[in-house]
Image: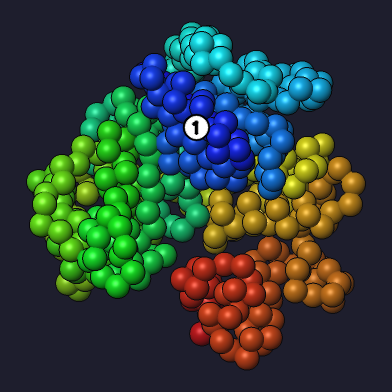
Amino acid sequence: MANILVVDDEEGVRSFLVEALDSEGYQVDDAQDGLAALEKLSSRAYQVVLTDLRMPGLDGMGLLHKLRAQHPDIEVIVLTAYGTVESAVQAMKLGAFDYLQKPVDSPKQVRTLVARAVERYRLRAPAQSDSRDRAPLMTSQSPAMQAVARALLKVAVTDATVLLLGESGTGKEVAARAVHQWSTRAAGPFVAVNCASLSDTLLESELFGHEKGAFTGAANRHKGRIEQAEGGTFFLDEVGELKPSLQSRLLRVLQERRFERVGGNQSVECNVRWIAATNRDLGEMMRQGAFREDLYHRIAVFPVRLPALRDRREDIPGLARALLARIAVDIGRPNLTLHESACRQLEQQDWPGNVRELANALERAAILVDGDELRGEHLSIDPFATQPAASSRSEPGTMADVERDAIRRALDACQGNRRKAAEHLGIGLRTLYDKLKRYNLG
């Protein structure tokens, strides 16, 4: 059956809709607003979303814009109060499947409309499957990236464990999501955990869950992320950051497909497809005794290395346009376009932070630029200076120059405190350390 997401800030409405659809055998989740819905959408594939139009925070129309940009295949049904049908009609013009007028008091009406939306999704699904080669990974102009996409497409239809290798920001999570979407587990959840973002203690509980009373503050049983990924795909990002104790626990899960929650002794079976990723040299870590060789062979059944952006410059214009289109919607400026002069300048950069750095540069420029056209000169703006960085030079610096200067200024402003400098820059502490090493800033 299909996965359905119900989004409404009224608990009574959510409960009514969930109950009406759950009785039909659908897998139904609910969210209280648009932002909570986006979190759900990041970890599970849905075929239909029912969303109220008027909600605090991100409202239904804003959610619809994001769905059309990020999940164009999902069918959307909007809920509208009496007297605001015009808004529902506008939503349909933007791509919504249909609308329901509140108060919704007929379970049969809900089920009928959702069944129609599911059927439309399924009728379009074969065409989507046949056009997988038009997915973002498959539209690359780079031979190296095309080879990666072909390899991922082949392994996707199996349950083999995949290890994604490559520098930070090369798109390893995008690749992992593509494998999930192309697999037979696409209707199941996609759950991602970044091993570098949590302490060892928190990571253990996050991965395996915990029993009530397992530690101070554990008032209830908590299902871990592995358990939440049941029937779907579990993406373990930055696997090279796992400490030896957690490596041992993970190895057992991969071998036996079962585990115990923290503080418990009852085995929990798990049926998930594993994808791991790292920017570390696991071979060198094994030689140093920092990474278990038996675990490596478990996760590296099908290793795939993603090329750095500087090694596929021909993809930069297309990537930049796609990223800017998404950014433009997010910041409420959908008419923003990328001028050829900007494309040329972007192609000349090395992008040590890869696609993530490219996206950050575009977002920064998109926020600061006046008008609806982002040109080359808008990309040399240093956000930590009172004037464009180029004004203090005879010639504009590269993006790497801008980034290096920004890091220096942030460190000076924070009196050398790297954690505060990372917060000031809006990046993770580990990312800052990588950039300090890359730019020889000590």
Question: In this view, which residue lies farthest toward the right?
Answer: 371
Residue 67 location in percent, x, y?
Answer: 61, 32
Quarter placement of the N terminus: top left
- The colour mode here is rainbow
Residue 359 location in percent, x, y?
Answer: 63, 51
Relative vertical location of residue 130 with respect to residue 304 in this rendering, above or below:
above
Quadrant of residue 393 in the image? bottom right
Relative placement, left or right, of 268 versus 302 is: left
The reply to whether residue 46 is visible in this rendering is no
Seen at 27% across and 45% down, the residue is 227
Q: Give, as a three-letter code, the residue at label 1.
A: Ser
Seen at 22% across and 66% down, the residue is 214
Relative vertical location of residue 383 with respect to residue 305 in this rendering, above or below:
below
Residue 240 location in percent, x, y?
Answer: 30, 62
Which sits in the foreground, 396 or 172?
A: 172
Q: Which residue is mark 1?
A: 15
Which sits in the foreground, 235 or 227?
A: 227
Label 1 SS: helix
Seen at 66% across and 23% down, the residue is 103
The reply to whether residue 228 is visible in this rendering is yes
Residue 264 location in percent, x, y?
Answer: 15, 59
Relative placement, left or right, of 117 versus 321 is: left
Relative vertical location of residue 24 with respect to residue 391 in this rendering, above or below:
above
Which sits in the foreground, 234 or 91?
A: 91
